[in-house]
Image: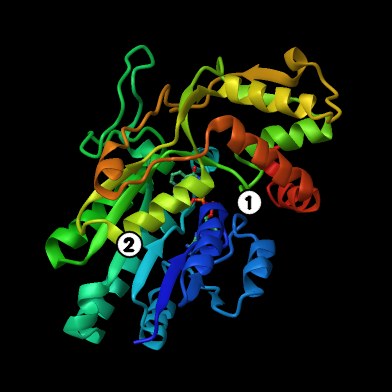
C-alpha cells in the first residue's frame, strides 16, 4: 500500500502550515481535499505544488459521490480533517455553511471512511489507519474570568455560537463513529492559533493590516475577552505528535503558553510594529475603537494541556512575543498576498 495521507482543508490556515511541515518530515504523498471556499488560498496551493508529493483535489467533503472514489483510487493510510467553516462572525450572520461543512461534511467524511475501512482495507492495513479530527476549545463555552479555571478533555460541552455548536456536533459524530463502528479516530481541541498564512479576517492579521494601511481597528465590547494563544507551528507539531502516537478514541487539548485579552494582543502588536520603525498613522487611543459586543461572545477560554504533555511529551515552545514578531515579519513580507486576501474577505473590514 502506497504511503498516502488525506488532509482536508489544506488550503486554509492551519492545514497549509501542517502540510508544509509534513512534507519536510515524511516521505509519502498528501492528497489535499479542499473545496476552495473564500478561506482556501490559491497562493498556498502554488507554494505546495512546488512539491510533486502534494496533490490537490477540489472536492466538497459533503459530496459523497466525489469522496468515495477518492478513497477507492488513492487508498489513504490516514485522514487528518481540518476542513471547516472557521470564522465565528460569519456563523452569526449565516450559520448554514457551518452546518453544511462542520456537521454534514464531517458526517459524510466519516461515512466515506467507514465504507473504506470496512470494505476496502485488509485487516493488516486497518491496524495502521487513523482518522484525526481537528476541533476547538470553543465547544466548551466560557470560563468565568475571575476564576483560574481551565477546560480539560472531560469538560462539559456548552457551545455559545453557531460555529461552536457546529464544531461540537462534528465532535459528537466522530466520537459516536468510534464507539459504534470502532473506527480508529482521535480528536484534538486547539486554542486560538495565530501565525503565518492566517486569513486577514481574524484578529491578529486584521490588526497588522489595519496598522499597515492606517485604518482604525474595531473591537467588540470592552475588549477584555480573554483567549489562549497558540503559535501555529506549535499547533502543527502537536497535531503531528497526536497523529503519530495518540491513542485511539482519545481527545487531546492543545493550548499555547499565553492567555491574553483582545486589547492586550492589539497593544502588543501595535507596540512591536512601532518599535521596528513601521509608520503608525493613528495613536493607540484612536486606533482602537470599541463597539457593541458580539452576541454569544464568550468571556474566557483556557485549556489544560497536561494530558498531551504527559502522554506524548508535547509542549509549546514559542512564547507569544516571539510568535507575534515572526507573524508581523511574515505579513510584511507578504503584503501583496495580504491585500489580495483582504479583498476576498472585504465584508469584514
Ligand atoms: N484557527 C484557529 O484558531 C482554530 C482553533 C481551533 C480549531 N480550529 C479548527 O481547525 C480547522 C482549520 O482551521 P483554519 O483556521 O485553518 O480554517 P480556515 O478557514 O483558514 O481554512 C478552512 C479550509 O477548509 C476548506 N473548506 C471549507 N469548507 C470545505 C468543504 N465543505 N469541503 C472541503 N474543504 C472545505 C476551505 O476552503 C479552507 O481552505 C477548522 O476545522 C477549525 O474549526 C481552528
Q: Nearer the viewer, mark 2 or mark 1?
A: 2
> How many residues crowd around disc 2 within 10 Å: few (fewer than 14), some, or many (20 or more)?
few
Residue 136 picture location, percent across and down: 39, 43
Q: Quadrant of residue 302?
A: top left
Q: Secondary structure at mark 1?
A: loop
Q: Quadrant of residue 179?
A: bottom left
Residue placed under numbered mark 2 in the picture: 244
The residue shown at (53%, 66%) is 24
Which one is earlier in the sequence, the residue at label 2 or at label 1?
A: 1
Residue 300 picture location, percent across and down: 41, 24
Residue placed under numbered mark 1 in the picture: 197
Does the Cβ of the disc 1 residue fall within 8 Å of ligand 1? no
When the figure is inspected, residue 188 is found, relative to residue 164, above or below; the finding is below
> How many residues crowd around disc 1 within 10 Å: few (fewer than 14), some, or many (20 or more)?
many
The residue shown at (64%, 74%) is 49
Q: Nearer the viewer, residue 116 or 102?
A: 116
The residue shown at (77%, 15%) is 286
Residue 203 can be seen, yes or no: no
The residue shown at (39%, 63%) is 80
> Residue 278 got which mark?
none
CA distance for labels 2 and 1: 25 Å
Total number of numbered labels? 2
Q: Nearer the viewer, residue 19 or 217?
A: 19
Q: Secondary structure at mark 2?
A: helix
Q: Nearer the viewer, residue 15 or 232?
A: 232
Residue 201 picture location, percent across and down: 63, 41
Residue 189 can be seen, yes or no: yes
Amino acid at each position: 500500500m502506497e504511503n498516502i495521507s488525506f488532509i482536508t482543508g489544506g488550503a486554509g490556515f492551519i492545514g497549509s502550515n501542517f502540510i508544509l511541515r509534513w512534507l519536510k518530515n515524511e516521505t509519502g504523498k498528501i492528497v489535499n481535499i479542499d473545496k476552495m471556499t473564500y478561506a482556501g488560498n490559491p497562493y498556498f496551493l502554488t507554494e505546495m505544488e512546488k512539491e510533486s508529493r502534494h496533490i490537490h483535489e477540489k472536492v466538497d467533503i459533503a459530496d459523497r459521490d466525489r469522496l468515495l472514489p477518492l478513497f477507492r483510487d488513492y487508498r489513504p493510510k490516514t485522514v487528518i480533517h481540518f476542513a471547516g467553516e472557521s470564522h465565528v462572525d460569519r456563523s452569526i450572520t449565516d450559520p448554514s455553511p457551518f452546518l453544511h461543512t462542520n456537521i454534514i461534511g464531517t458526517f459524510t467524511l466519516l461515512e466515506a471512511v467507514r465504507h473504506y475501512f470496512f470494505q476496502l482495507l485488509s485487516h493488516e492495513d486497518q491496524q495502521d489507519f487513523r482518522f484525526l479530527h481537528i476541533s476547538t476549545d470553543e465547544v466548551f463555552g466560557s470560563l468565568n474570568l475571575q476564576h483560574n479555571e481551565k477546560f480539560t478533555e472531560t469538560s462539559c460541552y456548552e457551545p455559545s455560537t453557531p460555529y461552536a455548536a457546529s464544531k461540537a456536533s462534528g465532535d459528537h459524530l466522530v466520537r459516536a463513529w468510534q464507539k459504534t463502528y470502532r473506527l480508529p479516530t482521535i480528536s484534538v481541541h486547539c486554542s486560538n492559533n495565530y501565525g503565518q498564512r492566517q486569513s486577514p479576517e481574524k484578529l491578529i492579521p486584521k490588526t497588522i493590516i489595519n496598522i499597515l494601511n492606517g485604518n482604525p481597528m474595531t473591537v467588540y465590547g470592552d475588549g477584555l475577552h480573554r483567549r489562549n494563544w497558540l503559535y501555529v507551528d506549535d499547533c502543527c507539531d502537536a497535531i503531528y505528535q497526536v497523529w503519530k502516537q495518540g491513542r485511539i478514541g482519545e481527545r487531546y487539548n492543545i493550548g499555547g503558553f499565553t492567555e491574553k485579552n483582545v486589547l492586550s494582543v492589539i497593544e502588543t502588536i501595535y507596540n512591536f510594529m512601532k518599535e521596528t520603525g513601521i509608520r503608525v498613522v493613528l495613536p493607540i487611543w484612536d486606533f482602537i475603537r470599541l463597539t457593541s459586543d458580539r452576541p454569544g461572545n464568550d468571556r474566557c477560554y483556557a485549556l489544560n494541556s497536561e494530558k498531551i504533555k504527559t502522554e506524548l511529551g508535547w509542549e509549546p515552545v514559542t512564547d507569544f512575543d516571539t510568535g507575534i514578531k515572526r507573524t508581523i515579519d511574515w505579513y510584511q513580507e507578504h503584503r501583496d498576498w495580504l491585500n489580495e486576501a483582504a479583498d476576498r474577505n472585504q465584508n469584514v473590514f
